[in-house]
Amino acid sequence: VPAPDPSALARDTLAGDRRALARLMTVVENRSEAARPALAALFPHTGRAHIIGVTGAPGAGKSSLINELAKAYRRRGLRVGILAVDPTSPFSGGAILGDRVRMQELAGDAGVFIRSMASRGSVGGIAETTGDLVKLLDAAGFERVFVETVGAGQAEVDIARTAHTTVVLEVPGMGDDIQVIKAGIVEIADIFVVNKADREGADAVAGLLESMLDLNTGEARRVLQESCLADMVCPPDSYGPDGWRPPVCQTVTSTAQGVGAVVEALEMHWEYLDRSGRRVARERLRAATEVEGILRQELVRRVVARAALADMSALVDRVARRQMDPYSAAEALLARLS
Amino acid sequence: VPAPDPSALARDTLAGDRRALARLMTVVENRSEAARPALAALFPHTGRAHIIGVTGAPGAGKSSLINELAKAYRRRGLRVGILAVDPTSPFSGGAILGDRVRMQELAGDAGVFIRSMASRGSVGGIAETTGDLVKLLDAAGFERVFVETVGAGQAEVDIARTAHTTVVLEVPGMGDDIQVIKAGIVEIADIFVVNKADREGADAVAGLLESMLDLNTGEARRVLQESCLADMVCPPDSYGPDGWRPPVCQTVTSTAQGVGAVVEALEMHWEYLDRSGRRVARERLRAATEVEGILRQELVRRVVARAALADMSALVDRVARRQMDPYSAAEALLARLS
């Protein structure tokens, strides 16, 4: 098999060639330098897709919900892209077996493109690649692009910075567990979905979420400010549901109960972003997040290129023996870069 | 209140002053430059603590298990530090209510120090601060230091790179859910604990884990290699249970059932690391991870210092309008740094 020419792959992707799209995704995932001209060429063709982040705890039913939403959108004649960013499998890159089985239903549909992403086990790298894969799907003409991420840690904040609409899944508490709604979650959710709503406690969770939304002052959002470049160049209200009351939907994905209401909520939010002018702020935040991700990656690449790994290895030895503290070792490496 | 002098805080921390330790932790968490001399001064006093990472899905019972383990160690006369790195609350930094309640039992014990860390919402930053807080507890004479992280995404890999011993919690599958053991988890676990072992299916999970351990070839570990500087300068067998068969324990934390066996497993692993010489490799990996974290942080700090944020803002505007692709924008920013 000859090495694929990314420029040709980009051209064929625009022309609707699924195989070219899949191959280009692999080039992007491999972080090949060759992907860059292709991404640059496709970039002006992006900006049409509604990018929908779906987050929630493992087992909350994210994949099943996306599966049902995708089927609903297909009935409306829209093309659907799905990126399953599954950082719960940082090594193998494999999706959870059950999810894969459920996703099979859509696999034969030419109007659907599903990609299960391996996490590369590298801090910061996942978000960057996700953004590029979203762009590929967008340029290829998929009008709704779902990005599934596990609801934990940085991934949630990343998705809020990457998507136009962030859907947060909750499930009723199980057994004797105390129902937990995470602090700060109302700051990033545009739509709440209480899944497995046939279980006891669904109304209680929905009620708890509504109370949290009543109390939400937007204060916590400012915490994000100090942490990253993107937040420094975007106003604090760039994300979060400012001026939009996030609806709290209830679904049972096994019977598709309540899925229609989620589709309506998604469409209403998309219209709201346009009507209110807030889509511009979101696009800016998305752009800033992406530039920052590339910047971080590139800075580390420079260290690898300029500092000999042997040097780093020697410094690490000294730190491990407690002859040098780690800050001094990092400074010594940085000194070699300037 | 006058601003604390970090050098004095470091001295008082070594002398066993809890209040000084707490204040120094705040200085570290705030990422103040003032923390560095204090950390450098304390660094030679580190290296005595057994650092134990505890990871698992939200709701698996990590806090409850740590609570019981801490009580068991206290009965043995050992001092225990606990860092609850809770990235599931990226905004408020608050721990889950139920966990806080359970942890109260230990709060009055002078031989225990508990710190709940706020995630700062910043990629890469959590791991760095965790390492520094661990060092503070180590220098302050806590002989066993538990680091609790949610078992998702990067956090699991980070903990495996930071701890001497990594404990992975699993729980029996709930209801109709397919029992999922994450791919790659056997690569990082030194000890497995099936918690909530009074639930149906505990033996099945334990059996599944044993089968996975039987099949483990160590192949997946190599995937980590390509992703980060630390892995580039440390051999692939620096972490993971090479030469050590991870025991699979079963616990019911509400009755402390099985907790004693986990303590025994922890002590055996600590002895194993010394006896086999593998503790040296772990210390090296820990050092490399720390140096890399500081390096990443410092590189971004340079960008903020040298590139005007106004410049970045203007570039981000162009990307958001699709007049410039994000790679070109990142390159333009990098060009200003050299």
Image (cartoon, coloured by chain):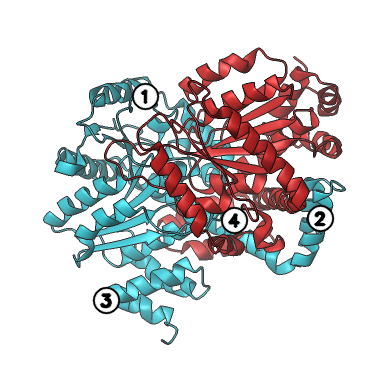
Chain colours: A cyan, B red
Q: Is residue A195 left or right of residue A224?
A: left
Residue at numbered disc 4: A296
Lower position in the chain sequence, tag 4 or tag 1: 1
Q: Amino acid at mark 2?
A: Asp
**Residue sitting at the far left:** A75
Residue on which the image places disc 2: A317
User: Can residue B3 be seen from the camera position used here?
Assistant: no
Q: At 51% across and 64% down in the image, what residue appears?
A: B327
Q: Amino acid at mark 4?
A: Arg
Q: Could you tell me residue A303's position as x and y percent? A: 70, 62
Which of discs 2 and 3 lies nearer the camera? The answer is: 2
The answer to whether tags 3 and 1 share a subunit is yes
Q: Position of residue A147 (x, y in %)?
A: 35, 52
Task: Give the quadrant of the N terminus of chain A.
Answer: bottom left
Residue at mark 3: chain: A
The first of marks 3 and 4 along the sequence is: 3
- Where residue B231 sits: x, y (%)? 65, 59
The dot on residue A15 is 3
